[in-house]
Amino acid sequence: MAEDETKERTKGAEPDTDGNNGNNSNNSVENAPEDNEDEEVIERFPPDQEASLLAEANEHKKQANELFKTNQTDAALTAYETAVSVLPSYLFYDLALLRSNMAACYIKLDDWKQANRSATEALEALDKEQRRIEKEKANPKKEEPTDGNGVEQDDESVEDEIVSEGAKLAARPPPPPKEPTPPPAPVGPTDQDILRIRSKILLRRGRARSELGGWANLAGAEEDYKTLSAMPTGTLGGADLQLVKKQLKDLPARTKAAQDAEMGDMMGKLKELGNGILRPFGISTDNFQMVKDEKTGGYSMNFRQNPGS
């Protein structure tokens, strides 16, 4: 599937202009219950209306891509948002592409929080599309058997007719067997398409989380880069692969430092709160000492009357 990608200077921030026009004819529904996706009710626009909305969304997307190329990032972002508002929300693959492109815009604007959010929404849409495809593969549509001329066979219509030997000899020879009809071309994204887009989204979210900082974000970035490193060989380009390796080398120390800082800050606030509660009794948190039992790994609390002595 062709993809006319827009290149730009910021690493990991080029829009996805996938050639797929959203012909995902069996996508799941918007507003379907999330707690039991196996029982989703398919509720779609009529085909002509869906095609019209998709064409309109693709026009906005095309305009946004051109704006992005010319560094009109704010205008591009607005055009992508318009495309999202027009696109039927059950076309998950197309929605993932638009959300991914919005993340690229936010990265270019150094808006890491929104980049993280848009990339996460893109992954959620892509996950829904993948579940739809897997469900479709597990439950393929069964076609009625035909006689080779497009006429359905009725296995119970008549019994076999008894034919005399003379009639058999006079009968016309059977027609030559027809060449098997080739299977139809796949409609919608392939597994490779989804993997490729997923890698781009993870690169964008990983960068956004890394730039945001903080224990949770850095730990999340580390997970994103681990997922990227486990992808099949050839999924990532050379530069992206080097970036992933570097981040996996640098992030653990950053994550640990952020964890220690946040834990220290939290313990300081808890100590301050505890001292406020204990002060009327003439004691403080310094009177209590946590002692670790090396055998069990558990902790016990000791009370010290004079902690300073």
Image (cartoon, helix red, strand yellow):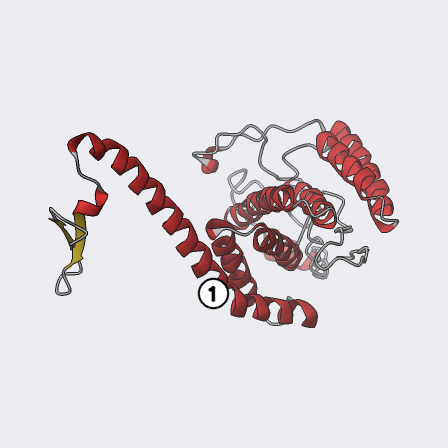
Asked whether, in this view, residue 97 is left or right of residue 224, the answer is right
Out of 139 and 133, give the one closest to the viewer: 133
Task: Please identify the quadrant where the N terminus is shown.
Answer: bottom right
| Frontmost residue, 99 versus 164 | 99
- Determine whether 32 is above or below 116 in the image: above
Residue at left offset 51%, top offset 60%: 222
Could you tell me if residue 35 is visible in this image? yes
Residue at left offset 72%, top offset 33%:
87
The image position of residue 283, as x and y in percent, is 17, 38
Q: Position of residue 209 (x, y in %)?
A: 57, 52
Left or right, 178 with respect to 161, comes to: right
Question: Which residue is at a point 80% across and 44% down the rendered structure image?
Answer: 73
What amino acid type is highlighted by mark number 1?
A: Ala
Check disc 1 and report its element: helix, strand or loop.
helix
Residue 145 in view of the camera: no
Q: Residue furthest front?
A: 309
Q: Residue at x 67, y 43 (%)?
A: 99
Above or below, 254 against 286 in this view is: below
Q: Is residue 285 left or right of residue 168?
A: left
Q: Position of residue 219 (x, y in %)?
A: 47, 55
Question: Which residue has dot 1 on it?
Answer: 253
Question: Looking at this view, is 238 or 47 the one in front?
Answer: 238
From the top left corner, tell me how far across and down residue 275 is, in percent: 26, 37
Quadrant where the image shows the C terminus: bottom left
